[in-house]
Image (cartoon, rainbow, N blue to C red):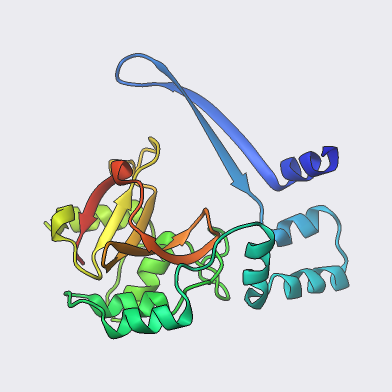
């Protein structure tokens, strides 16, 4: 336990600050910033061979095995279920972007590595998927939301169609509407997104309704 605790605090930089909310109450903000495996290898003085072994081990083809070892679920659909879902994809202004995003199912989640190899995070997945349709979107989820809001492209939950975006806020972060997460509505009450919980791209039922702060149509 001591060794695991020591490695955890080697892997994660913890920062904190206190500010005051609108009611004059003190609010404690804690941020945990995780280092990449490569950064950890450098910190531990890995030699060239060890770094190569580390890169090989983190290849995306092994991701599903790590998820099983960690007790995490799958991507939310079997290959057969995915084919059936795509064959019956409901119509929508950008339903094709759902099919594009679903090609990334199982790709590993990483904020610092998003855009390299097959790594992605929530906003990068959205940006990458729409780029395949020659539609340029900003990199950050909050900026994506603000762009849609200012373009009068915000919609209600009841208006959601495949390809629309769902935005979540989990804490005050100073961003537009304090947004910190985004996913692509896939229809049938499901969303495809890069999950920091499952550490991969998944499709699952819409979650945390009380944290959904905006819906937008690109």
Q: Is residue 98 left or right of residue 173?
A: left
At horizontal 66% and vertical 57% (from top left) the residue drawn is: 70
Residue at 72% x, 62% y is 38
Expressed as whole percent of the image width and height from the top left, the position of residue 119 reads 55, 69
Q: Residue 112 appears at what percent x and percent y?
A: 56, 59
Which quarter of the figure has residue 100? bottom left
* Location of the N terminus (image quadrant): top right
Q: Quadrant of the C terminus?
A: bottom left
Q: Position of residue 176 (x, y in %)?
A: 29, 44
- Residue nearer the viewer, 161 or 11: 161
- On screen, residue 132 versus residue 108, left or right, reads left
Quadrant of the rendered structure where residue 189 is? bottom left
Q: Is residue 176 visible to the viewer in this orientation of the structure?
A: no
Residue appearing at x 38%, y 35% in the figure:
172
Q: Give the residue at x 35% y 46%.
A: 208
Q: How many marks do you count on the picture?
A: 0
Expressed as whole percent of the image width and height from the top left, the position of residue 102 reads: 40, 76
Q: Can you say whether 17 is above or below 205 in the image?
A: above
State the residue in front, 119 or 143. 119
Q: Is residue 82 left or right of residue 72?
A: left
Q: Is residue 53 visible?
A: yes
């Amino acid at each position: 336990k001591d060794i695991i605790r020591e490695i955890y605090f080697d892997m994660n930089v913890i920062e904190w600050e206190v500010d005051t909310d609108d009611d004059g109450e003190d609010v404690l903000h804690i941020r945990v910033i995780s280092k990449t495996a490569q950064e950890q290898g450098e910190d531990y003085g890995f030699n060239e061979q060890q770094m190569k072994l580390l890169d090989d081990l983190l290849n995306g083809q092994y991701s599903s095995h790590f998820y099983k070892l960690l007790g995490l679920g799958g991507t939310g659909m079997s290959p057969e279920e995915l084919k059936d879902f795509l064959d019956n994809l409901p119509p929508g202004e950008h339903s094709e972007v759902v099919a594009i995003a679903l090609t990334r199912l199982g790709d590993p989640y990483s904020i610092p590595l998003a855009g390299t190899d097959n790594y992605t995070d929530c906003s990068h997945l959205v940006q990458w998927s729409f780029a395949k349709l020659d539609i340029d979107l900003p990199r950050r989820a909050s900026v994506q939301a603000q762009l849609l809001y200012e373009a009068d492209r915000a919609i209600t939950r009841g208006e959601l169609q495949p390809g629309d975006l769902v935005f979540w806020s989990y804490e005050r972060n100073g961003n537009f509407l304090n947004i910190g997460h985004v996913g692509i509505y896939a229809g049938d009450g499901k969303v495809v997104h890069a999950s920091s919980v499952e550490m991969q791209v998944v499709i699952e039922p819409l979650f945390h309704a009380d944290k959904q702060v905006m819906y937008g149509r690109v």
